Image (spheres, rainbow, N blue to C red):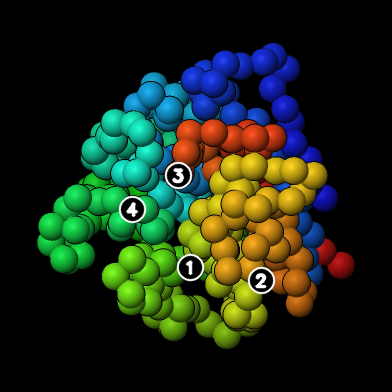
Amino acid sequence: MSAADRPRRRHGPLTLFSHPRLVRHRIADPRWVLPDLTIAVLSDFHVCRPWTPLSALRRIVAMTNALKPDLILLPGDFIADRNLPARSVPAALIVAELAPLTAPLGVAAVLGNHDWWDCALARQSDFARNSVVEALEASRIALLSNRAMRVEFGGGAFWLAGIDSQRALRRRGHPGLHDPEAAFAEVPPGAPAILMAHEPDYFATNDPRAFLQISGHTHGGQMNVGGWRPLTPSAYGSRYGWGHIREGGRHLVVSGGIGYSGFPLRILQPPEITLVMLQRGV
């Protein structure tokens, strides 16, 4: 079941990003045998001026903390699309604004395609270095680039795995930097696992090791015409465009994200803070 809590007052084009709507997804699954878990998802910031400035990010962090989630996930695209008519913001300043995010089980992140494509340090170093990686590694935020961590919760534990961008090197004619085998290498067979992957398309591989995948990337298409999202950047069109998708007994949640890519416009697809409520199923 999904629901969107829309703002009670209208916002102008610049203040909208300071007050995103809250979108809730409730998932009940028999593979989840632990107590109820609440996950806040903040995706696709694309921080830049004037569209998604640091001041907006500061307010979004405060709004997220006020929700008191158990876990906070950041599925990538921290920096701006360099083709956007905007002034970019250094990754170190973005991560510094995210530092106050707090949750009992921590804050974890993966990188998005634009964190590679539009990182000047990555391009200058032939992708040997990355400013977003270095900023995150110097912070309290756990960067899950093709690795997993065991999370103690409610008298038991689950695994949180993350893969790097599947489109990181596409502009160079190479595959992405994702390595699912490395990501799940330490996850015991049959253990409850959640996967964070920037692009939702990995869900189509039907990998059974994670019963829930959390993604961003699509921005909900940035345009939503009665559920038709023609601008969704996915090999599967609108199939994984937004929301809670169920296939083969597995779950995918795609956040509509915060910022812009391509052009600074959203049509009937406002920015969002995504809240996933995971419960025991029967």
Q: Nearer the viewer, mark 1 or mark 3?
A: 3
Q: Depth check: 266 or 163 in front?
A: 266
Q: CA distance from mark 2 to mark 3?
A: 32 Å
Q: Position of residue 12 (x, y in %)?
A: 57, 16
Q: CA distance from mark 1 to mark 3?
A: 29 Å
Picture layout, residue 175 above or below residue 238:
below
Q: Position of residue 133 (x, y in %)?
A: 26, 55
Residue annotated with mark 3? 262
Residue annotated with mark 4? 115
Question: Residue placed at 80% from the left, 44% from the top?
Answer: 226
Q: CA distance from mark 1 to mark 2?
A: 12 Å
The amino acid beneath tag 3 is Gly
Marks 3 and 4, the one that precedes in the sequence? 4
The amino acid beneath tag 1 is Ala
For label 4, the crowd category at 10 Å Cα-Cα, with few meaning under 14, some 14 to 19 and many 20 or more, is: many
Q: Secondary structure at mark 2?
A: loop
